[in-house]
Image (cartoon, coloured by chain):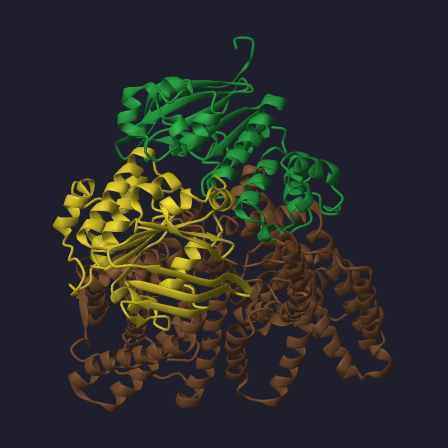
Chain colours: A brown, B green, C yellow
Amino acid sequence: MAFYFVQFLTGLASAASLFLVASGLSIIFGVTRIVNFAHGAFYMLGAYVAFTLTERFSGALGFWGGIVVAALIVAAVGVLVEMVLLRRIYHAPELFQLLATFGLTLMVQDIVVLIWGPDDLLGRRAPGFRGAVDFFGQNIPSYDLFLIALSPIVLGILWLLFQRTRWGVLVRAATQDRDMVAALGVNQKWLFTSVFALGVFLAALGGALQIPRDAVHHALDLRIIVEVFVVVVIGGLGSIIGAFVAAVLVSELNAFGILIFPKISIILVFLVMAVVLIVRPWGLFGKPEAAARRTPGLTVNPWRPLTSGERLMSIGALALAAMLPLFAGNYALTVGSEIAIFVIFAASLHFLMSVGGLASFGHAAYFGLGAYGVAFLAKAAGLPMIVSLLLGPLLGLLGAAVFGFFAVQLSGVYFAMLTLAFAQIIWSIAFQWVTVTGGDNGILGVWPDNWASSPASFYWLSLGIAALVATVLRVIVFSPFGFALRATRDSPLRSEAIGINGKRVRWTAFVIAGTTAGIGGALFAYLKGSVFPDSVGISLSVDALVMVLLGGVETVSGAVIGAIVFKAANIWLVSQTDLSKLVLGGFIVLMVVAFPKGIVGTLEALRNRRRSTDTKSALATSRVEVAE
Amino acid sequence: MSMVPTLLSVENLSKSYGGVHAVRSVSFELRAGEILALIGPNGAGKSTCFDMLNGQNMPDSGRITLLGEDTVGRKPRAIWRLGVGRTFQITATFPTMTVRENVQVALVSYGRQLFNLWGSTAAYARGEAGRLLELVGMGAYAERPCGELAYGDLKRLELAIALANQPRLLLMDEPTAGMAPRERIELMRLTARIAREQSIGVLFTEHDMDVVFEHADRILVLNRGSLIAEGSPEEVRGNPQVRAIYLGEGLVYDARHREGAGA
Amino acid sequence: MKLQVADLNSFYGPAHILFDIALEVGEGEVVALLGRNGAGKSTTFRSIVGLVENRSGRIVFEGKDVSREPTHAIVRGGLGYVPEERRIFTDLTVEENLEVGRQPKRPNAPYWTREKLFTLFPNLGEMRNRPGGRMSGGEQQMLTIARTLMGNPSLVLLDEPSEGLSPKIVEQMVDAILAMKKEGVSIVVSEQNLHFARLISDRVYIIERGKICFGGTIAELDARPDVRDAHLSL
């Protein structure tokens, strides 16, 4: 009994940091509407800076002062980030904001390693809380008791701040309608900055307070951010009390889950999250999001099928690509195959995002499932390549059908966070279920059959499938289903009022996209001859998002261009620098700020501007004639 | 009138939120081809009533019978399948499509082709979409991007979309909100003409008394969730209780529609 | 002259919305800006208070050009703005909504306290702790005006205050606007309802497709039925 009680207290103590970070994320989201992916990075920075300060300054004052000063320093960094970066993207679509802050996260990962090195750092114990308390023969670290007491205190302070001060009233008002707050004479720039500073302070404090419990290392950011996403999805984004309750819930599920499913304890958290989402899609304490106001004056060009000229051009480009083996070497062909595979992957996500308006942050899950599917079939069942290629993607379909069912209950940032969490669950399974997946060692020796084993024939295979996939997806975009899907994105209210079952339509789209990604993953397994948990990882999911954005979200076929450019640049970049995350992160941030329409979107905008100046002058003349 | 079939019958409809009675025991009937206005002060329960009729909200008690079927508990899309067209107070259309495509999507849904992955939407029911657009006077705009339309034209497009399932009943929530006076009259004339020709019943809410008195066959007045008056425009206009609660002195609508002004 | 706007041009993205708008509001005057939906009434207001960033022209408020100032600075200078669609903070109580609008007392402008506002809008005084989301449309509209008055403005821009309100409430709105005028607040009201405009305004402007096409008194407008019918579709 005492053992379970101690386990319970350990869970509560872990909840403290989680609550601090999640409440910070919620506060920032409430006002700025930005889901700050970099929140995990600030948490990690808090831990690193606190480590340095507490090592440097001795005594109780040195330790506790170091913790607080570390949080303040990181908050100051946060203010800088807000003023330099976020102020430029407050009016951008939420997906861009998530991506930009993810870019920051990538940059911080490399910077942290540059400053503190790649090794784990063990921090000092907290002065005054070094010992343990005996409870019926079980030891509870007294520092845990301190953490348990801390979170309700922080909760109380936050509550007073928001309910009892003018600043709090202004923040709550801005949470609902920030333009209106400005229209009442409040300088919202500083309001936003102060809110962001508070949120980052809480995250950094959460990180700093962890150093007596946990080693500091450069993967802390992704670990905490995924947990925090789960917490805010369960508790409700924007609700501090929700963050508190859900942080406790998740920590306890982890604490006890380890006793029940020692290998894959994350399953328990997933089950609870699934139940909450079905009963209350906006979380335990969240509120349904009001429909976003449309930006006035935003003209959208309707999509149209390719003209016959454009069709000829596409076929010509494909024919040109098919001639590559005539003059390129084996390395170039392997790169070419990889690019073709990523065209498939990017096109599948693009279909979901552009047509369905569903930005998945965990699309690699289905790519990876396709790859694992092939590996199981080829290695375990010994099936020939053609059969594995046909059946492997079905694992992607299955995964997309199960997770998609839950994911399409939500939209917007909730959808993004949930898909990310799902992908992370699949990653954990791939990583931890060593007997089946080989864990970190992966599954090796998945080689193509003889007919496809030469680089040239594999390239032709990949290119052919990529062309087929892109064509089929394009046909679906202009099919009745494609229009129905676009209708649910354009106006959920109207589409429901004309008899469209939005969830079923979106679920179908999710399954189509997941299966298509699985096809890419299946080819990828054969290309590499192996499968690793990396094929399910967050960075692969984000690569796909970047490819789509680079090509242009608002276009029909931008993903193809985006994938080619990004993948080629990426392969080149990795061969040139050790700081690829820093460069890639910087590139993402720059792209979101400077190039939000992507390559194809920018080209289209240029072409339309030229066209509209022509028609405008024609219109002006006709109007003059009428007026006279 | 007694020969005309009843389309919609509402009996003792009630709904409360947190102890506040939003709608109390409201009953009324609507016949085919009839235009019925639901008016009342802000917060009187009009929206709640509307949301229960179109399936967005569950009543606490009461019955809604539409074309002989009990619709309580059905989803909006199921009620649409029964033959109800809707327009919204703030227009809801698909801005990334052309005007014709907006109507075509509704026709795709009506033809149960939503999960057709291989057909061409451009070719689907093109003629029918064109006919509906002609009906509301939008034929010339068929290939325009919907996002470029003026507000009054969007309202007419919405009407065309609402007619795509050959409805027996139109539910229009403040159909003329945000329109210029002449556009208001034109839209309601158009609606009335279509309703009479196809004997569609129309239920609408509205704050513009010029529109209500000009076009409604019958008016229901709601106050604090209860029906306080029902009758022809003349009767409602002359009702002292309605004047005290809702109409006021009649300073802010057309003099022709004030009581005793030569109705 | 309270407010003088000249050569105002505004853009949403590539779209040119307002063309050389010019209008003037005298001390203590109530001016109506009439026009149909999409004519540019709201954009004019949003441009004056700086919510449309892409704009050019002169906006002189109390002798000072404010066209380069951010919204909050313009509003703090005493130019109040009540947007269309009410936009109250539904999670906040009546008192808290008013608190968001509170600004220090300023010279040359009437000073409003909560108590004084509750006399002007007696309904609000009876529901001080009610969340805005649980008020009726009419009460919400009154609250948006009261909230803006908490900033002690000397000029208020009222965007379509009668839209979506019952005739009875619109009549109360007329009384409230006239009471504000009596206190010395200058007011610009955008409207589609000419009956309403008649009851409150000293002068009217008509805006059509982003251009001012008429300016004068109600009597002058009535003398030009051609103008009135062409642009207001009455």
Viewer-nearest residue: C218 or C194: C218
**Left or right: where does residue A337 sit relative to residue A589?**
right
Viewer-nearest residue: A242 or C79: C79
Q: Is residue A164 above or below residue C174?
A: below
- Asked if residue B224 can be seen in this view, the reply is no
The image quadrant that residue B111 belongs to is top right
Residue A148 percent location from the top left of the image: 22, 64
Q: Residue at x 60, y 70 (%)?
A: A598
The image quadrant that residue A258 belongs to is bottom left
Q: State how many labels appear.
A: 0
The single residue placed furthest to the top in the displayed view is B2
- Asked if residue A19 can be seen in this view, the reply is yes
Q: Residue at x 48, y 36 (%)?
A: B175
Q: Residue at x 62, y 80 (%)?
A: A570
Viewer-nearest residue: B60 or C10: C10
**Left or right: where does residue A435 sit relative to residue A525?**
left
Residue A202 percent location from the top left of the image: 29, 70
The single residue placed furthest to the right in the displayed view is A326
Q: Is residue C122 above or below residue B248?
A: below
Indicate the quadrant containing the N terminus of chain C: top left, top right, bottom left or bottom right.
bottom left
Viewer-nearest residue: A315 or A608: A608
Residue C163 percent location from the top left of the image: 38, 42
**Left or right: where does residue C169 sit relative to residue C42?**
left
The image quadrant that residue B67 belongs to is top right
Residue A553 percent location from the top left of the image: 60, 64
Q: Residue at x 39, y 70 (%)?
A: C58
